[in-house]
Image (spheres, rainbow, N blue to C red):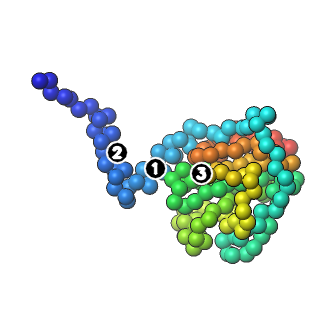
């Protein structure tokens, strides 16, 4: 009988599986795997024939301090709209890139990061991570054109309401491709 030799890749795979079974290590591992994806995956621009037009509306939300707001969408301003959660590994993986994009475009683009979570939990997460992002809690049903069953789902919507990018799953929002698109949409 031939004795089986274990390769280092077999051992690494076995350790990886065991770590995924341990609840305390599951989320950090999933975030790390998604960060690898974010490093290589830039969002895709919708083909011209696949781009959908949304009707202008005001998104009824509350902010982290509990104040009600109505954020205009498709009303002469480029919008970055994100549906996310603090417990979602792909969301956690892409937030640093969104933060960097917000730092450079937050005064020119309307950023709307929406979550259904408990505001206290979200506030603790944002403070712990050091993010300065515009986080909101929806106070209305999601418009049908923007409904998606998975998170993260992110949109870039131009000034006229055309969905230029719809991306589900983790992506690199701080890529040169996204920045170039935003510059084009802003007329720079």
Residue placed at 66% from the left, 71% from the top?
64
Is 19 on the left or on the right of 178, as rendered?
left
Residue corresponding to mark 2: 16
According to the picture, the residue beneath numbered tag 1 turns out to be 30
* Residue 182's disc number: none
Label 1 residue SS: helix
Q: Quadrant of the C terminus?
A: top right
Rendered image: mark on residue 150? 3
Residue 11: quadrant of the picture: top left
Q: CA distance from mark 1 to mark 3?
A: 16 Å
Q: Residues within 10 Å of mark 1 (few under 14, many from 20)?
A: some
Query: Looking at the picture, how far across and down is residue 120, in whole percent?
Result: 57, 73
* Secondary structure category for the residue under label 3: loop
Specify few, some or many for label 3: CA neighbours under 10 Å numbering under 14, 14-19, or 20 or more.
few
The local crowd at label 2, few if under 14, some if 14 to 19, many if 20 or more residues have their Cα within 10 Å, is: some
| Sequence-first disc among 1 and 2 | 2
Q: In the rendered image, is residue 24 in sight?
A: yes
Relative to 61, say whether 143 is above or below.
Answer: above
């Amino acid at each position: 009988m031939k004795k089986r030799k274990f390769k280092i890749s077999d051992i690494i795979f076995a350790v990886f599986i065991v770590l995924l079974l341990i609840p305390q290590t599951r989320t950090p591992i999933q975030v790390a795997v998604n960060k690898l994806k974010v490093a290589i995956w830039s969002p895709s621009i919708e083909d011209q024939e696949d781009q959908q037009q949304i009707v202008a509306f005001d998104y009824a939300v509350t902010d982290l301090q509990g104040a009600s707001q109505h954020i205009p969408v498709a009303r002469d301003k480029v919008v970055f709209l994100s549906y996310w959660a603090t417990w979602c590994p792909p969301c956690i993986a892409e937030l640093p890139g969104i933060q960097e994009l917000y730092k450079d475009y937050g005064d020119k683009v309307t950023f709307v990061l929406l979550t259904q979570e408990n505001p206290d939990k979200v506030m603790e997460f944002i403070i712990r991570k050091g993010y300065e992002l515009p986080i909101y809690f929806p106070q209305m049903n999601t418009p049908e054109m923007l409904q998606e069953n998975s998170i993260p789902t992110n949109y870039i919507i131009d000034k006229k309401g055309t969905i230029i990018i719809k991306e589900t799953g983790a992506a690199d929002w701080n890529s040169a491709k996204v920045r170039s698109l935003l510059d084009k949409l802003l007329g720079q």
